[in-house]
Structure formats: C-alpha cells, structure tokens
Image (cartoon, helix red, strand yellow):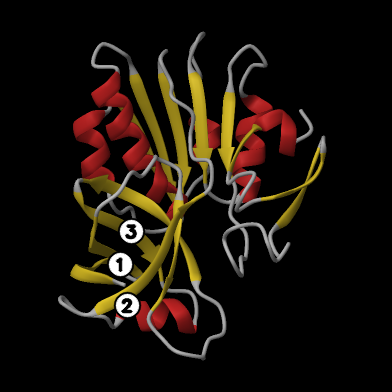
Amino acid sequence: MALIRSNTLVSPGIYKMTVAFTGAVKPGQFFMLRAWDKDPLLSRPISVHDYEPGLLTFLYQVVGKGTEILARLQTDDDVTIQGPYGNGFPEITGDLCVVGGGIGTAPLYYLVRHYRNQNPLGKCRVYLGFRDIAYGVDAFEVLADEMILDVGGIITHKLAVLPGETVVTCGPEIMMEAVAKVVPKENRVYVSLEAHMACGIGACLGCSCETRSGNKKVCKDGPVFVREEVFYV
C-alpha cells in the first residue's frame, strides 16, 4: 500500500500520479497498481515515469475501468502497488537517442534523467510523437541536447540517427517496428514492449510474446528487448 502525494490531470485523459515509495527502481521497470477489491479482476501494469528517493511517479492514460478508478484517487488516498517488475533499460554509456510515441513517452523520461546524471558529457537527443496533443515535453527539453517534436504526424519520418548512438524506443508497436527497421544495424536498439498482464512476475503466461529465441514473457523477460529479438530487421 502506498500513500498518494498527488494525482493530477496533465492532458485530456492523461494523469500523473506520485506516491510515497522507498526502494531501488531502474528506468524501464513497471509496477502493478490497483485501488479496488474484485472488479476489475486484474491490477494494471503502469511503467515508472520518474523516481527519486521517497517519491515514485506514474504517467498513465485512462483507457478502461481500472485506470478510470485510478484517475479518481486523491491526495492522501491509498493505492496498492506491487513491484518494481521487469528488467528495465540497460546502462548506456555512449550517446543516446530516444524515440517515444504517445503514452509510450512515459518510461523514457526517467531513462533520460538517469542517463544525464550518469553521463554528464554524453549527448542525448529526443524524438517525441503525439497523435493530437503533446504532453510532458517541457521536462524532456530541460535534459535533451536536441528535441524533435511531431504532433499529428509520424515521428519516424523525422528520425535521423547518428553513428554510435544507442537508440531506445517505446510507443505503438507499429512505430517501434519502424524505428527498428530504419535505424542502421550498426546502432544498438532497445524496444520497450507493452502487453496485457495478470501477475507481473511471469507466472500466468498472459503476456507471452514471440521472439527469435522462442516465446518469452514481457513482464519477466522484458519489457525491454533488443530489437533483433522481437522484430525481423
């Protein structure tokens, strides 16, 4: 159980929730959240948007009954959180390029902030694409050496990866597949997958995905994979 410090609307249908939490959290990991008893049956997997000692932040989209309940929670309410789960993003020491689409931008902010803290001399470029309204971009602008924004278009059409950059992408699967295909094979690419989950620990097999090395579980083996594992490029 965690105490909610804030839960605010940041854009139509998009909320930012900050809760009290102590523990180690890696960029790219996720938690299972619930604030109800039996209905809906399953908790909701929400990626970590940001973390600093004592405070854990989620950026989430209202898409069904579970997230509708989460959106109604107020400061000082309790929410059940389980985690962190998943293997998260690897430590990146060279230059970084992140490509996010829609709510898939959520886990990328903590990655960029962590990267900047660990690599003050590294270069970080950010590509963000949104269908209609951009949200959360100001936070990225503070940390990025360059930021390219697209609203209503296709961000991958603007993507130009530099030699030596590690690319990390999260968003709609069609966008991530496009990133995987257009980035030169010489660049390392990591993709963060989304999936419906029941347990978050790999016990239920509900989030299995096909990879080149056989079926794997997004929650336990992922959600972060190298592109060659999940996309044929």
SS of the residue under disc 2: helix
First of labels 2, 1 by sequence position: 1
Query: Does 104 appear above or below 70?
Result: above
Q: CA distance from mark 3 to mark 1?
A: 8 Å
Q: Is residue 27 left or right of residue 206?
A: left
Q: Residues within 10 Å of mark 3 (few under 14, many from 20)?
A: many
Residue type at numbered disc 3: Phe
Q: CA distance from mark 2 to mark 3?
A: 11 Å
Number of callouts in the render? Answer: 3
Going by the picture, which residue comes out furthest to the bottom? Answer: 38
Q: Residues within 10 Å of mark 1 (few under 14, many from 20)?
A: some
Callout 2–callout 1 Cβ contact below 8 Å: yes
- Kindly report which numbered mark, 3 or 1, lies closer to the viewer in this rendering: 3
- Give coordinates of residue 108: x percent, y percent: 39, 41
What residue is at 33 percent from the left and 16 percent from the top? 123
Q: Which residue is mark 1?
A: 15
- Quarter holding the C terminus? top right
Foreground: 142 or 182?
Answer: 142
Residue type at numbered disc 1: Tyr
Foreground: 107 or 202?
Answer: 202
Say whether residue 159 is visible: no
SS of the residue under disc 1: strand
Query: Does 214 appear above or below 180?
Result: below
What residue is at 53 percent from the left and 41 percent from the top? 87
What residue is at 48 percent from the left and 74 percent from the top? 63
Q: Which residue is mark 2?
A: 71
Residue type at numbered disc 2: Ala
Where on the picture, by quarter, is residue 115?
top left
First of labels 3, 1 by sequence position: 1
- Give coordinates of residue 155: x percent, y percent: 49, 39
